[in-house]
Image (tube, coloured by chain):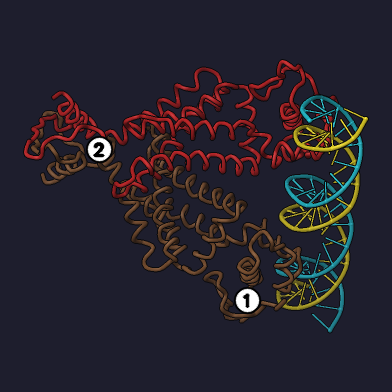
Chain colours: A red, B brown, C cyan, D yellow
Amino acid sequence: MTDVRDEGGATAAASGPGPSGKTPMREVLIEAAFQLFMEHGFERTTVDDIVARAGVGRRSFFRYFPSKEDVVFPEHERCLTEMSAFLAASTDDEPLDAVCDAARLVMRMYAANPEFSVQRYRLTREVPSLRGYELSVVHRYERTLAHYLRQRYAGDPNGALRAEVQAAAVVAAHNNGLRAWLRGGGHGDAAKPVDQALTFVRQTWDDAGESTESGTAPTPDDDVIVMVAPRGAPMWRVVQKIEKTLGDE
Amino acid sequence: MTDVRDEGGATAAASGPGPSGKTPMREVLIEAAFQLFMEHGFERTTVDDIVARAGVGRRSFFRYFPSKEDVVFPEHERCLTEMSAFLAASTDDEPLDAVCDAARLVMRMYAANPEFSVQRYRLTREVPSLRGYELSVVHRYERTLAHYLRQRYAGDPNGALRAEVQAAAVVAAHNNGLRAWLRGGGHGDAAKPVDQALTFVRQTWDDAGESTESGTAPTPDDDVIVMVAPRGAPMWRVVQKIEKTLGDE
DNA sequence: GGAGCCTATGGCACTCAGTACCCTTCGTAA
DNA sequence: TTACGAAGGGTACTGAGTGCCATAGGCTCC
């Protein structure tokens, strides 16, 4: 039962002990909780165990974390706020680019603390209640992205639907890239797989017809394009070529 | 405290009292629970209240439902099984069509009991723990679709990623259509908004380049196509025209 | 027809998360 | 010095979920 207060080296998060020297109770609790979760697992660790190790009162735990699950995801609340702010300030021409960049904020939060992120990843995979919690967090990110897209697509027929689908696609792609990085133990650059995955999404809608509606510049109606391509060429090459032709003029 | 056992008219689900005449306890519990949820709300109804109204022992509740939330989603387990079976038996050429059809199974389950579905929808919107439960159910559908797609795309570079993104897109679209129907009070045909939403997803990947990889039949390399289109035409029209040209021969 | 058995149900006691309420302490401003 | 507000502690309670055992009803096998 080592009292963990005022110890350094918190696995937990960025904000360590301030210049005052005293570690804030929030950090103390996160540190104690993760020690115990690693030793005995999430479910076999009670809140009483955590506060005992942290050397604080039980009631204090629930002052800092509304539930036992919250202590595992200490930075998501801040990250959600950042994402909202980022999108509100976004001046990106292409809505999809803006939400891809917004998704990268989450990736960077994970990448800022690889060891912590990987520990949490492993924990989350095997504890149902943590999975559930994570789903709700992911859902809030998705709602934030969808809300932004809905505003940007306001007026479009199917705008709300496109917003939902693109938000879901971006989140799925981001998570796919992020999980690849986490499965690999958090070594290397998290941005790489995530960028790759997001590029895939971008290309999907670049290639798709509707991108012309808000993407490439409109061209006069009475004009025509003539396109010649090898018959075996995959459709995306054909589209690429058309788009290039249009862009060149 | 009316005992609800052996009463008819369960709002709940399909399988009413069998030929034996005795309503199965599962149905009795669902009926009692929904009565109370409608009267006092989900959170202010305890499991003790439910079993009291159902006239059964408290322990029996947890034999039929692993948690209080489960009683609100009594048919999802069966529907998930059906979805897996459907996909396993699917012989669809186009993987995306198969998962769209699989998603429609869920819509039909909702549509089979409009009143019950709308009640649940309203309940779920305002109770956080039910929201969380619903997210986990939706996630399981998404995993099922993604699993199928991953197998179908095995070997493709980016196959796993495409599977994730498409599964997420299909689920988002399906839910968008379904929610529109639920918001409208469950009147009219649920299939209509869902089909419309799923068509949107289909078109996204029809228009996108990659559909050629597994979609249209390959054509000889040394041949060419010549395509003429009005310049102002949206890209998906252009692609549609190309595909039509290819298909005609 | 009774012994053995299996399944469905009830009852009880327990753990643990989360909450309401109230108390103490300490630093600070008036 | 007093007043006050923020931070933390303590206690008792509610309610979900679990483990264990007892009971009842129906079944088969002898």
- Figure label count: 2
| Quadrant housing the C terminus of chain B | top left
- Quick check: B218 left or right of A103? left
Whether residue A186 is visible here, answered yes or no, is yes
Percent position of residue B210, x then y? 28, 35
Q: Which mark is residue A134?
A: none
Q: Amino acid at mark 1?
A: Thr
Circles 2 and 1, Cβ within 8 Å, touching? The answer is no
Q: Give B160 or B65, whichever is nearer the viewer.
A: B65
Left or right: residue A191 versus residue A74 is: left
A54 vs B169, nearest the viewer: A54
Subunit bearing disc 1:
B
Q: Residue at the location (49% across, 64% down)?
A: B118
Give above or below for A141 relative to C5: above
Q: Label 2 to label 1, Cα distance in Å?
A: 53 Å
Q: Nearer the viewer, residue B203 or B125?
A: B125
- Residue A176 percent coordinates (x, y): 47, 33
Q: Residue at x 55, y 31 (%)?
A: A79
- What is the quadrant of residue B196 in the picture? bottom left
Q: Earlier in the sequence, mark 2 or mark 1?
A: 1
Disc marking residue B23 = 1
Mark 1 Cα within 10 Å, few/some/many (few <14, many 20+)? some
Assess disc 2: are there few (<14), some (14-19) or many (≥20) residues with their C-alpha within 10 Å of its C-alpha: some
Q: Is residue B150 visible?
A: no
Q: Which mark is residue B212?
A: 2
